[in-house]
Amino acid sequence: MLIALIDYGAGNLTSVRKAFTHLGAELYQPASPADLARAAAIVVPGVGHFEATRALTPEWHAAIRDALDRGQPLLGICLGMQWLFEGSAEAPDCPGLGVLEGRCWRLTSGPDRLKVPHVGWNTLEPAGDSSLLAGLPAGSSVYFTHSYACPVTTATAATTEYGGERFAAAVDTGQVMAVQFHPEKSGNAGLTILRNFLARVAARAATEAR
């Protein structure tokens, strides 16, 4: 069960790979969009500026959309989650994949003059049933580091609040899943989420094998 780890030069691949390997997953980095065809699922990680996603050319957009059309599960992490939306105020002329509605905006410091970027542990507030978050104790905290946030939509599985602003911390459409935080840096809670994603991938593979 191969999982494609997309490398577009936005970092944190090593820690993401290490977390998945710890859980027994087999990952590879596709060298070209055509190389996605052998993947059972796709992971889009990333940190930093939304402009970095411009390296995901229209050919990558098309290949990832084709993979979704074939039913492959996808997990976005941090910048990889933001890229799944239509775009971001951080790089207004750089399009996202657009499989989730809305655009990302810059966090403000709020009345308490909190620092931006939002860095550190924050509590998840479930926003509906999601097997991606199954097994997480109430009040679970995870590790964030970001300056831009994703809108709360019908796809939102959990939210959190910073500087008086509530935003999507996780999304789950059943096939497209993503988290604004870093599960690979979030201890047992993060490993639980990655394990749940792998269970979703395995369930799809078992269904296809019948």
Image (cartoon, rainbow, N blue to C red):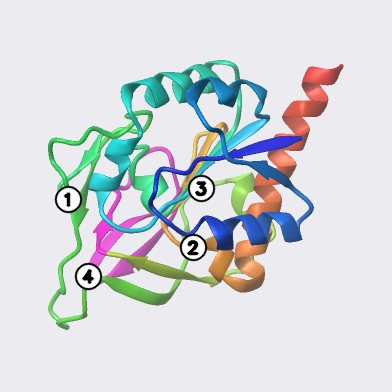
Taking the spot 57% from the left edge, 46% from the top edge, the residue there is: 129
Q: Amino acid at mark 3?
A: Gly
At mark 4, the secondary structure is: loop
Left or right, residue 22 beside residue 89: right
Q: Earlier in the sequence, mark 1 or mark 2?
A: 1
Taking the spot 47% from the left edge, 65% from the top edge, the residue there is: 124
The disc placed on residue 128 is 3
Q: Earlier in the sequence, mark 1 or mark 4?
A: 1
- Quarter occupied by residue 112: bottom left
Magenta span dominant secondary structure: strand
The crowding category of the residue bearing disc 4, from other C-alpha atoms within 10 Å (few below 14, some 14 to 19, many at least 20), is some
Left or right, residue 183 beside residue 93: right
At mark 2, the secondary structure is: loop
Measure the alpha-carbon separation of dots 2 and 4. 21 Å
Q: Earlier in the sequence, mark 3 or mark 1?
A: 1
Disc 2 + disc 3, Cβ < 8 Å? no
Q: Which residue is mark 1?
A: 90
Taking the spot 52% from the left edge, 23% from the top edge, the residue there is: 68
At mark 1, the secondary structure is: loop
The crowding category of the residue bearing disc 1, from other C-alpha atoms within 10 Å (few below 14, some 14 to 19, many at least 20), is some
Percent across and percent down for residue 60 are 41, 26
The disc placed on residue 164 is 4
